[in-house]
Amino acid sequence: MSPDGGEEAGGAMSREEAARLLRQRLEMGATEVFLDGMTRAEALSMLTRAPRRATVPPPAVSATPVAARPATSSASAPALPEEYDDLRAMAMACTRCRLAEGRTQVVFSDGPSQARLMVVGEAPGANEDETGLPFVGAAGKYLDLLLATVGLSRAESVYIANVLKCRPPGNRNPLPDEIEACSPFLRRQIDLVRPEALLAVGSFAGQLLTGRERVSLGDLRGTVHSYHGVPLVVTYHPAALLRNPNWTRAFWSDLQLLRGVMDGAGGA
Ligand code: SF4
């Protein structure tokens, strides 16, 4: 599925991929791991024997968290800036993964950094790569419209960012090492924006922020999760809605859920 998509990245995992997944879960502070088809002994063995993927040096969140969440630092990786402008500048010059080679622009965010809601998508597409802004194509306009139906103005109340800041070639799916390299930027953005609520659109954003990488989007949506204390709703990517209009009702239901959370958090 393309960066504008919202479907699953299926397929069997290699031993190295499984080990990386387990390490990510631990670094994210997870206290439980789903071991589909794997015993606890096998998982522990994998963690101690498999080499860590070394193709991309991951930027680490520093040991001093801005928000009330556990730090996810790595002793060997440089810390990310504590100031928003410094973080943005660092991302705009980033060459930590292969996607730097083909991008036109780094797409860091759109919207006020003190927004009530933060929408997290997947990765820039062609329009975003060209303009430097997320969600500017047809899917973005549809998202604006849907948010407006629950009283959320994109211009005034919504901050938007993606899991990846650079466009994958041909709009292919993000690769695991690209997500590993880039997602610390997103995590620090969430720390600094500190929204009242998060809306993850599409499976990559939903799986990353819930820490449930093997759970389908259909199973993640329809409930309120917590991302280190911030209410999180997962739903379809608006581009997926354009391809599958039958999912619009479910999206609407998820927006109502989100709106209810935000109303409970402090009103409109
Ligand atoms: S996708 Fe993220 S990690 Fe990769 S070069 Fe762009 S900003 Fe850096």
Image (cartoon, grey):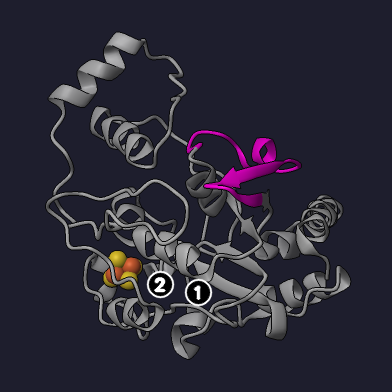
Category of crowding for the residue at label 1, using alpha-carbon neighbours closer than 10 angstroms: few (below 14), some (14–19), many (at least 20): many
Q: Are marks 2 and 1 in contact (CB under 8 Å)?
A: yes
Please count the marks in the image.
2
* 165 in relation to 163, above or below: below
Category of crowding for the residue at label 2, using alpha-carbon neighbours closer than 10 angstroms: few (below 14), some (14–19), many (at least 20): many
Per the rendering, the mark at residue 167 is: 2
Could you say which quadrant of the image residue 241 lies in? bottom right
Could you say which quadrant of the image residue 201 lies in? bottom right
Residue under circle 1?
125
Identify the residue at the far bottom of this view.
131
Could you say which quadrant of the image residue 46 lies in? top left
Q: Which residue is nearer to you in this view: 263 or 30?
A: 263
Magenta highlight on residue 96: no
Residue 86 horizontal/vertical position (percent): 32, 81
Per the rendering, the mark at residue 237 is: none
Seen at 46% across and 86% down, the residue is 132
For badge 2, the amino acid type reads: Arg
Seen at 32% across and 30% down, the residue is 18
Disc 1 residue: CB within 8 Å of ligand 1: no
Residue 11 horizontal/vertical position (percent): 44, 34
Q: Which residue is nearer to you in this view: 172 or 20?
A: 20
For badge 1, the amino acid type reads: Gly
Asked if residue 165 lies left or right of residue 253, the reply is left
Residue 119 horizontal/vertical position (percent): 62, 65
SS assignment at label 1: loop
* 148 in relation to 63, above or below: below
* 126 in relation to 18, above or below: below
Q: Which of marks 2 and 1 is nearer the N terminus?
A: 1
Residue bounds of the magenta highlight: 212-232
Q: Image quadrant for the C terminus?
A: bottom right
SS assignment at label 2: loop
Seen at 66% across and 75% down, the residue is 158
